[in-house]
Amino acid sequence: MTITAAILVIGDEILSGRTKDKNIGYIAEYLTNVGIDLREVRVVPDVEEEIIAAVNALRQRYTYLFTTGGIGPTHDDITADSVAKALGIEISEDPRAIKLLLERIKLEDLNEARRRMARIPHGAELIENAVSKAPGFMVENVIVMAGVPSIMQSMLDNVAPRLKTGAKMLVESIDTGGLPEGAYAAGLTEVAKAYPSLSIGSYPSFIDNRFRNQIVVRGKVADEVQAGLAAVAAMLKKLTLDTPIS
Amino acid sequence: MTITAAILVIGDEILSGRTKDKNIGYIAEYLTNVGIDLREVRVVPDVEEEIIAAVNALRQRYTYLFTTGGIGPTHDDITADSVAKALGIEISEDPRAIKLLLERIKLEDLNEARRRMARIPHGAELIENAVSKAPGFMVENVIVMAGVPSIMQSMLDNVAPRLKTGAKMLVESIDTGGLPEGAYAAGLTEVAKAYPSLSIGSYPSFIDNRFRNQIVVRGKVADEVQAGLAAVAAMLKKLTLDTPIS
């Protein structure tokens, strides 16, 4: 069974470039490692109708939807209410969340703004985090997490054991040893056709004014990945012997 | 006039977490600086129907759509053909692009795979880059760029002067000096209501086991931004005098 996911990053600060997102890459790698296939990512602003539209598009299409950002106490933190609206369920202050907040905040400091962090859609499971205590939540297949990376990472560790996972994606890569993409593209196309169950990609980096390319072979069956990898290696070896590197 | 944009990142390697995207943050900051409002970002895999669906959703909604990735010579580079299909226009080998490739590649090395990099939708303008010579292109309002950051950045510099731009977003920020979000959230809500033309956000960072929060005031009219900033500063000053920092 294939388990799929999308990420929805919520926040004007990412779209303005003021904050450089660090969560997409982290979650992507994390999900790959536990056997969940990340299929799509979207970034939207702190605008209710944009959040609702994206939540509904993504939650209906994938096994899980992970959101980051917009669950703090300020006026621009509208994720929890927007997710509740998207799912058509009620939201109110949750005594379990209040209890968690009181582990960090004194009762006399628990003002109206901070109480907003305890607004949780009905029927949701809380997602605790060791860093700030303010919880995220999982409601139906939507997993709502903080935007601050250390807090998000703590929440991901907390929620991961509750998720269904599929076969883990096995990944092998080969450095092309200076061979440019244009030299091996035809050969790689042949290998990709011969191993249709594998996902074979070519990833150029441009370092020190030279391309350093990696060919990556991904699949869920170890024998197939190894066979594909061997085919790529043989193809590269033949080219390296045949072709002077320009 | 408001000029808007979306980014579409194309590539399995981003979704698997193998490659950490560096283009979204760079383009976001670049567009903000030239007066284009980035409104949405999507990341999709190297799958034709996914690319076509995202291109059509985004190009119809925003002034410009910028894509990154998938324009190299290998079998997984399907962006140019997918964009042409999305727009319903023909694509073929472009003599202008071949000429550019020959500045870097010897004629005898210009094999079938490399020629694929010269496939350009009819009616497109080329976007040159100094790094690899293989061009991107702009067709209608879709700007197709490479995924390798240094090449993408060169293309962005090349295409930017051709774009319409609007009033530049002015951004001011204030450090809350250790005041936590929960202490100023109510006051900030009042300021945000008093300045509806401004976008006012609160951005927590968690550094050295403490929150360091920034309040950011954004708008397109300098006097309004300064007035909003002053109101935020006055609100924070009052709180700092009234409230012991916990």
Image (cartoon, coloured by chain):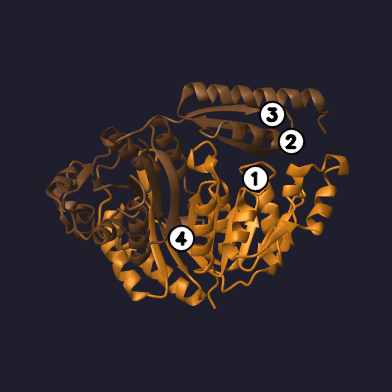
Chain colours: A brown, B orange
- Tell me: A55 left or right of B131: left
Q: Which residue is mark 3?
A: A176
Instruction: Identify the residue at image location x=17%, y=59%.
Output: A90
Binning the other alpha carbons within 10 Å of mark 2 as few (below 14), some (14 to 19) or many (20 upward) gives some
x, y percentage for residue B118? 75, 52
Farthest residue toward the front?
Answer: A194
**Does the CB distance between marks 2 and 3 fall below 8 Å?**
yes
User: Disc 4 and disc 1: Cα gap in Å?
Assistant: 32 Å
* Identity, as a three-letter code, of the amino acid under mark 2: Pro
Name the residue that disc number 1 marks. Answer: B148
Gap in angstroms between the C-alphas marked 4 and 2: 46 Å
Q: In the displayed structure, does residue B160 sit left or right of residue B35?
A: right
- Which residue carries the number 2 mark? A180
Q: Gap in Å between the C-alphas at discs 3 and 1? A: 17 Å
Q: To which quarter of the image does residue A114 belong? A: bottom left
- For label 4, the residue is B173
Q: Quadrant of residue A191?
A: top right
The answer to whether dots 2 and 1 both sit on one chain is no
Q: CA distance from mark 2 to mark 1?
A: 14 Å
Label 2 element class: loop
Marked residue chain, label 1: B
Which is more N-terminal, label 1 or label 4?
1
